[in-house]
Image: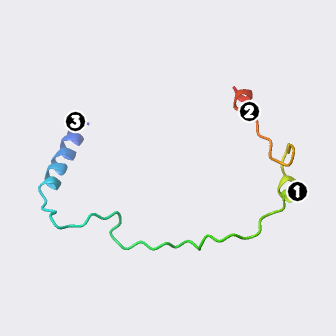
Amino acid sequence: MQGDMSSILVHVDRLSQIDIDGVEPTSHVVPLENVLREDSPRPSLERDVSLSQAPDPSEGAFRVPSPQAEA
C-alpha cells in the first residue's frame, strides 16, 4: 500500500506543476445536453386504483410499518 500511495503522490505532484492559468473549470469534457423530456403535469391514477394493490390501505392512504415496530 505504501508503494501505491507513493505513486499517487508523485502523480499529484506532476499535476500540480501543470500551468492551468486561463483554463476554465469544467465538469464535463464534452457539452452535456438534457436528454430527458420536459416535466409537464398529466393525469395520474385514481386513488382507488392505486390503493387497490396495497396490502393494508388505511383512510385513503398507504399504510407502512412503524420503524419502531421493526426493531
* Rendered view: 20 above or below 37: above
Q: CA distance from mark 3 to mark 1?
A: 62 Å
Where residue 63 sits in the image (x, y, percent)?
A: 80, 41
* Rendered view: 16 above or below 66: below
Q: Is residue 41 left or right of residue 62?
A: left
The residue nearer to you, when weighing 24 against 13, is: 24
Q: Say if mark 1 contacts mark 2, CB within 8 Å.
A: no
Residue occupying the point 65% across, 71% down: 40
> Around disc 2, counting alpha carbons within 10 Å, would you say few (fewer than 14), some (14 to 19), or many (20 or more)?
few
Residue occupying the point 20% across, 67% down: 23
> Around disc 1, counting alpha carbons within 10 Å, would you say few (fewer than 14), some (14 to 19), or many (20 or more)?
few
The residue nearer to you, when weighing 30 against 6, is: 30
Name the mark nearer the viewer: 3 or 2: 2
Disc on res. 66 = 2
> Around disc 3, counting alpha carbons within 10 Å, would you say few (fewer than 14), some (14 to 19), or many (20 or more)?
few
For the residue marked with disc 3, what is the amino acid?
Gln
Where residue 8 sits in the image (x, y, percent)?
A: 22, 46
Residue occupying the point 27% across, 63% down: 25
Report the residue marked by disc 1.
Answer: 48
Quadrant for the C terminus in the image = top right
For the residue marked with disc 1, what is the amino acid?
Asp
Circle 1: element type: helix
Of the numbered discs 3 and 2, the one sitting upstream in the chain is 3
Name the mark nearer the viewer: 3 or 1: 1
For the residue marked with disc 2, what is the amino acid?
Ser
Q: CA distance from mark 1 to mark 2?
A: 23 Å
Disc on res. 2 = 3
Quadrant for the N terminus in the image = top left
Quadrant of the rendered image containing residue 68: top right
Q: CA distance from mark 3 to mark 2?
A: 48 Å
Where residue 31 sits in the image (x, y, percent)?
A: 37, 74
Residue occupying the point 80% across, 63% down: 45
